[in-house]
Each structure stands twice: as C-alpha cells, then as structure tokens.
Amino acid sequence: QVQLVESGGGLVQPGGSLRVSCAASGFLLDYYAIGWFRQAPGKEREGVSCIRSKDSRTYYADSVKGRFTISMDNAKNTVYLQMNSLKPEDTAVYYCAAIKPFSGSYYGWDSTSSYDYWGQGTQVTVSS
C-alpha cells in the first residue's frame, strides 16, 4: 500500500526553524519526484518545493527561496523540508506528494495535478 506520512509540524516563533519529514512506504523513492505543498485557510494549495530523485534537482517557490531546503534520504525513504527564518505567512498545513516515474500527466512541479500520491498533511504555525 502506497503511503506518504508527514511529521514534524508544530508551533514556532517568527524567525525560528522547523524541519518537516515525509516518510514513504509501499514504494521506493528512486526515480520519483517528491513535492511539498502548503495550504493556508481560505487559500489554494501552493507548491513550495520539489526534488527529483533521479538527479537530485530541486525547485523552490520564490516566497521560500533562500529560507527552505529540501533533501532526500534514500536509505530512509524519506524527504525533508528544512524551514528557516520562518514568517507568519508560512503558517499552513504542509503536504508532501509524489510523482510516479514515467507519469503521463505532468504540468510542472508546482501543479497539484502532476502528483499521484498525497500525504495527510502536518500543521505548521508561525506565531509569537
């Protein structure tokens, strides 16, 4: 059974750091692309970052560039999102998602329609 499980969310003060994890089971991350999305109340889900397993290429939204870092540990079958210099506007539910190899429907790393599997999300709240 294919499953993605996020963890590591929580409450952090502005300027602080947090690392969220996405553990995959039922499949190996090799040749998959894993993306992080977030959704704040009343807003659409937006792409935050993505990493391609085959060449470790990474992508970031302009709003998080220089503050967030995505990484993949193939031995642990887990993807991480290190978030530094957090701002209140980073508050959202963070989701990880996976694109299958040779997927026939690819609309860009930041399009939800490109992704085949989704996790249940983890809440990140940035507040003093």
Image (cartoon, rainbow, N blue to C red):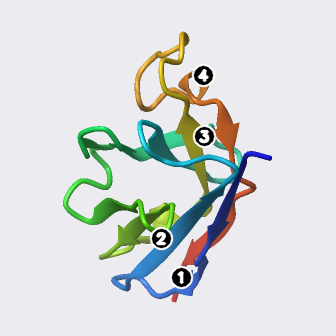
Q: Mark 4 points at which residue?
A: 113
Question: For residue 123, which quarter of the picture?
Answer: bottom right
Indicate the amino acid at tag 2: Pro
Rendered view: 21 above or below 119: below
Q: Is mark 3 on a helix, strand or loop?
A: loop
First reached walking from the N terminus: tag 1 or tag 2: 2
First reached walking from the N terminus: tag 3 or tag 2: 3
The numbered disc on residue 45 is 3
- Residue at the location (41% across, 36% down)? 31
* Residue 72 place in picture, x, y as percent: 37, 60
* Residue 115 place in picture, x, y as percent: 58, 30
**Residues at discs 3 and 2 in contact (Cβ within 8 Å):** no
Q: Crowdedness of circle 3 by 10 Å Cα count: few (<14), some, many (20+)?
A: some
Question: For residue 60, which quarter of the picture?
Answer: top left
Cα–Cα gap, marks 3 and 1? 21 Å
* Residue 38 place in picture, x, y as percent: 56, 51
- Residue at the location (19% across, 60% down)? 66
Indicate the amino acid at tag 3: Arg
First reached walking from the N terminus: tag 4 or tag 2: 2
Cα–Cα gap, marks 4 and 2? 27 Å
**Residues at discs 1 and 2 in contact (Cβ within 8 Å):** yes
First reached walking from the N terminus: tag 3 or tag 1: 3
Rendered view: 17 above or below 22: below
* In the displayed structure image, the side of residue 124 where residue 12 appears, left or right: left
First reached walking from the N terminus: tag 4 or tag 3: 3
The numbered disc on residue 88 is 2
Cα–Cα gap, marks 1 and 4? 31 Å
